[in-house]
Amino acid sequence: MKKTVATLRRQKEGGEKITMLTAYDYSTAKLMDEAGVDCLLVGDSLGMVMLGYEDTLSVTMEDMIHHTGAVRRGAAEALVVGDMPFMSYQTSVTDAVFNAGRLVKEGGAHAVKLEGGAVVTEQIRAITDASVPVFAHIGLTPQSINAFGGFTVRGKGLAAAKQLVDDARAVEQAGAVAVVLEAIPFQVAEIITRKLAIPTIGIGAGAGCDGQVLVYQDMLNMYGNIKPKFVKVFADVGAAMKDAFGAYIAETRAGSFPGEAHRFASGLDDAEVSELAGY
């Protein structure tokens, strides 16, 4: 049966960890779905890992709709969550509802994710009222990189930790169905997880969250520009890919590929081949 937001709630209540990975295309989403992942996040991280931008700020609604649609077509069971890109929801509540609707209607998302705590509760409430489930995102919020001055851990110190607790409570009260906790101290994440009825999904927030999410290029060592402390490389796919590309180049240049097993025969006899050659 297809995963839903109700599935995630039951997983939290039953103590079953939730798994989420980023996905940006059909074939990768299909593989992840077949592996049994609970949620696929079409993150605006695609700006960096797929489009080569320095950050996530240049990603557009059209980018998100395009990639969300591809992922949705590859996901038979997983819940697909589409990120709302920078300035698609901050400008007004009306814009937030309209753009969330586009991600669902045009991209096929089952839910949307937006960054921010108490400051975006009006948007969360309005989107939820429009029957679109919302994942909140607090802690390190990459769309605020310029305000933060870089990718820094959030919630250090008692005052900052209390602010995160307040933000988590606020987004839950506004109607969020889950909240991503990014780059915050593990003790703070554990406290937030205990205080909320909705699931928490951690990324750099320790094992005490209800679930985890990673950018798949990071966990497969395919994206080497930034290596966050919280990332574990589960397979060195990046090195394997480069080895395969190198072998293809070498064999093609040497003339050993394609071989007999990779070609098609015409069915012509020698005389017919000679006639064709002289035609």
Image: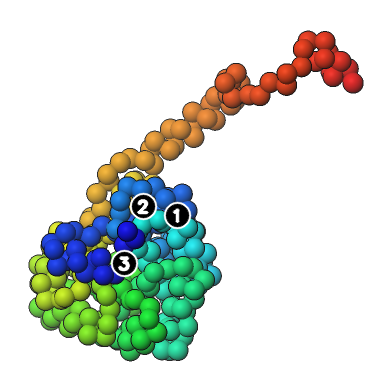
> What sort of colour scheme is used for the picture?
rainbow
Residue 207 percent location from the top left of the image: 14, 59
* Residue at image location 38% in from the left, 64% down from the top: 80
Against 89, residue 24 (above or below) is above
Q: Which quadrant would the N terminus be assigned to in this image?
A: bottom left
- Nearer the observer, 233 or 159: 233
Give whichever of discs 2 and 3 has the lower sequence position: 3
Mark 2 lies on residue = 33
For badge 3, the amino acid type reads Thr
The quarter holding residue 148 reads bottom left
Residue 182 percent location from the top left of the image: 25, 67
Disc 1 versus disc 3: nearer the observer: 3
Q: Which mark is residue 74?
A: 1
Against 39, residue 143 (above or below) is below
Q: Are marks 1 and 3 in contact (CB under 8 Å)?
A: no
> Can I make out residue 227 in this image?
no
Tell me the distance, in whole angstroms, between the alpha carbons under discs 1 and 3.
Answer: 16 Å
